[in-house]
Each structure stands twice: as C-alpha cells, then as structure tokens.
Amino acid sequence: MKILRAFFFLGIIMLCTTNKVTAQDKFDAEIVSVLQKTKQYAFGVSEERHFRGVLSLYDKLVASGVEISDYEIVAKGKFVKNLVKDSELEVLYQKYKGKVRVSVCSVAMGKLGVSEDQLIPGMEPVATWTVRVLQLQAKGYNTLTY
C-alpha cells in the first residue's frame, strides 16, 4: 500500500510540475528506496504529453538506480493516431524500443482507422485499454492512468 501511495504521489507531482520533475537528473534516496520494492510498472495514457512524461520517468528511474523488469505504456483514445510510422513519436520511441513495451487499444485503432501495419514497429495492439490495464494489475504491476 505504501508503494501505491508513493507511486500515486509521484504521478501527481509529474502532472502538476512536469518541468520540475523533468529537470531532475535523479530522484532522491527516499524515493528510490520506496520504488526499489517493485520492478513492474504500467501506465495508461491518452495524450502525447503523458506518453512523453512516462518515457521521461523511465529515464529518471533508470538514472536513479531503480531496477525495472517490466515497463509498459498502454495507449488509448485519439492519441493512438500519433503512434504511426514516420511520425515524430517513432523517432522518440526508437530510444526505448526493447526496454519499454507500448500496447495500443485496438478499439481506438478501429475508431480512428489505424491498422496494425501502420503502428510504429514494436508497438502491439491489445483488445482494449481497460482489459490490458486490468491484466497488468492482476500480474502485480504498479499502475497509474492518465
């Protein structure tokens, strides 16, 4: 429960003061100590700024020495149309490919006319955003949704 509270607090800080958190190279020892208790993280996002923020958080966690075994971003909503080949986000994602898994809601893909072949290579469609987040929670991931 303490881990979830710390993770929630970290998420709120990220939302309210993205520039301040992003400007830090590493988290302080107290944050690292709490976050060392978990190794699996999942984030549900529906906006590009949250996607970028969660990728930035990955960098901060790694730089701070937090061990990560699994790190997944689950994308939904209109934002999904930005996760296609030859987009600005494809260039950004290349840095994280193989380290961060990105799952994309197939319901959103269908509504927006985005096919699996159009997705950035390495990103995977999932049945729905909700079901995927629930699966990750059932597997013991610490989850945060935006």
Image (cartoon, grey):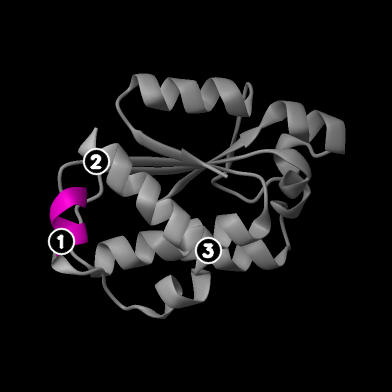
* Label number found at residue 16: 3
**Mark 3 or mark 2, which is nearer to you?**
3
The answer to which of marks 3 and 2 sits earlier in the sequence is 2
CA distance separating discs 1 and 2: 12 Å
Residue wearing tag 1: 30
* Label number found at residue 8: none
Residue appearing at x 20%, y 69% in the figure = 28
Residue appearing at x 53%, y 59% in the figure = 15
**75 to the left or right of 56:** right
Vertical relation: 84 (above or below) 102: below
- Circle 1 residues within 10 Å: few <14, some 14–19, many ≥20: few
Residue 63: % across, % down: 25, 70
**91 to the left or right of 110:** left
Residue appearing at x 76%, y 34% in the figure = 109
The residue type indicated by label 2 comes to Ile
Query: Toward which corner of the image does residue 69 lie, by quadrant?
Result: top left
Judged from the image, the secondary structure of the residue bearing numbered disc 1 is helix
The residue type indicated by label 3 comes to Cys
The residue type indicated by label 1 comes to Glu
Judged from the image, the secondary structure of the residue bearing numbered disc 3 is helix
What's drawn in magenta, residue-wise?
Answer: 30-35
**129 to the left or right of 73:** right
Residue wearing tag 2: 3
Judged from the image, the secondary structure of the residue bearing numbered disc 2 is helix
CA distance separating discs 3 and 1: 20 Å
Vertical relation: 59 (above or below) 79: below
Please check the rendered image and state whether residue 113 is part of the magenta-colored stretch, yes or no.
no
